Structure formats: C-alpha cells, structure tokens
Image (cartoon, rainbow, N blue to C red):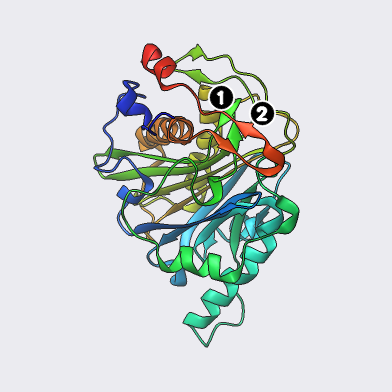
Amino acid sequence: MQTPRRVRDLGVTVGTLSTGPLNAVTDVPGVRVGQTTITGNGLNTGVTAIVPDGWAETLPAAVAVGNGYGKLVGSTQVDELGVIETPILLTGTLSTFRVADALISWVLDRDPRITSRNPVVGETNDGHLSDIRRRPVTPDHVHSALDTATSALPAEGCAGAGTGTCALGFKAGIGTASRVLDHGVVGALVQSNFSGLLTVLGTPVPAQPIDADGNSCMIVVATDLPLDARQLGRLARRAIFAMARVGSDYAPGSGDYAIAFSTRRTPGFADRDLRCPFQAVTESVEEALLNSLTMAQTTTGFQDRTVQAVSHDLIRRLG
C-alpha cells in the first residue's frame, strides 16, 4: 500500500501563484478545520467542519450551484442575505439533516439569546463504500469536529466527510490548498465524489468507472480579502469551473456546489482587481481536488466493495 502524498510532493505543480505555508484553507487567518471519521462494520463516513472566527456575528458569503442535484442546507438564506452565521459542515447525504440539527444545538449552547440561526451543511453520497441508510453520524460526532477544529493542516483523503467518497474512478475524499496574493490569502477545501476522466495538468488518466449512485462535489472557499457577497459569488462560480480542469463530466446526477466566504466584514475590493483572486481560487480548487485523490488510500467498505487509490507512480510520470 502506497503512503499518501500530496500532489505537489509527487512533482505536480498546479499553476503559478505561491501557496500558503500549509497550502491549505487554514492558511486563511482565522479559519479552522475539525473532522470526525467513522469507520468499521460497513461504515466509511464522517463530518468535516470549517469554522471561521467571527461566524457568530455573520460573515459575508455566497453560494454557487453548478448542478443542484444535492443538498446544501441553508443555501437559500445565504443567497438572500449574503452572509453565513454558523460554521460550514460537510457529511454524507442521509446524515445531512442530523448534522444540521446537531450544529444548531452546538450554536444554541453558545448563546442563550439566539432564537433563529441558519445552519449551513453540505453533502456528497458516500453510499458506495458506507452503509448510508444507517445514518450513523451522531451529535457527539458533530460536536467533536467543531470542538477540535484547529488552524493546522487538515487531514486529507480518507478523513471526515471524505472517508467514503470516490472521484474520477478512484478513491478520493477531502483535499485542500491555498494561494497567497499581495493583500490576502485564498484557500479551498473540497469533498470530492464526482465522475469523469481524471486529468492531471491536461493529461487524461484512464480508470475504470465506479458503479455508484450519487456523484457530487462540495467546495468551500475562504479568503481574508475584503470581498462583498456579490464578489464572493463570482469566486464561488470559478471554484466550480475548476472541476473541469481535473476532468469532471458534470453528470446530471451530480450535486456540484461551492460556498465562498470572507473573514473580513467590511468590503472594499474593486472588481477590476479580481483577476488574481479568480486565478487563486481556480488553482487552489484544482490542487485541492488532486490532493483529495493522492492523499486517499485504497478502501474496502460496505458489501466488500473496494475502490483503488490512484497510482502515485503514474502521477509522478505526469508531473
């Protein structure tokens, strides 16, 4: 079994912009990530929590929908008001609603004055490798992911909400990356679980298709640039565009969503200066998606189904 390696460690350099110190969404100041992983007895699932400082006072945000065949709880209010007011959580499809309920409980415990909050929870379908009908995620799993969130490099591949996901014919999962600009940082975290033909720096990597229901991708983009909700929506759309660079076929049954937020509440960024942030989000998402694959391990799960990790030797030859 090969040791998980980030794609950059395999000689593949995506784009031209500089990465942050961790090359992760947690390079954005004030952004933390926590995860709970559930494995064994036919289960491969979990929770990934993106926790920005200042969420309780709301942060500017926007959602982009590439294909709406999925669930992103709370997306309509984000679209209407242009803010998030809770952390952002990711999980498996049928656990979405239990995770949303547990997130609300966690938020209410922190402020006795709250009478209304909009939880933001996204999902992809991990039912190929996990007994999804059991809906095994509990409030303890959710609260653990939230309470243990740190600014360290998040675990990638078979971790948290990516424990049971597959993409582009291979085992996939969680991936992250970042880019540093003159006046701030753009970072991305992905939960990859979509179909297509894996493409690395423009070169296709053939794989056997996986006979699995539910092909989706959740992308979370964070920045400390002073962007308003409209500008964040433009970043979120570019995040979905970036899926094409790794070979997504944007299948009809795929729920492809991006949510972008800023840790700065006071906007002040000119549209004419968005060229570099657009490039940063495209590069970050492309590299995060590749990391979600190269950091994953071959996994045997529900009903003894096995999904292979992508060969690192093959990736090295493409670098």
- Residue nearer the viewer, 262 or 6: 6
* Kind of residue at disc 1: Ala
Viewed as shown, does residue 178 lie left or right of 243? left
- Residue nearer the viewer, 301 or 275: 301
Residue designated by label 2:
250
Viewed as shown, does residue 269 lie left or right of 74? left
Residue at horizontal 30 percent and vertical 28 percent from the top? 9
Residue at horizontal 53 percent and vertical 15 percent from the top? 205
- Counting from the top left corner in percent of width and height, residue 209 is at 67, 22
Viewed as shown, does residue 17 lie left or right of 39? left
Residue at horizontal 56 percent and vertical 24 percent from the top? 244
Mark 2 packing: few (<14 Cα in 10 Å), some, or many (20+)? Answer: many
Residue at horizontal 61 percent and vertical 82 percent from the top? 115
- Quarter of the view holding residue 319: top left
* Residue at disc 2, secondary structure: loop
Q: Where 243 falls versus 204 (above or below)? A: below
Residue designated by label 1:
244
* Residue at disc 1, secondary structure: helix
Dots 1 and 2: beta carbons under 8 Å? yes
Q: Where 208 falls versus 158 (above or below)? A: above
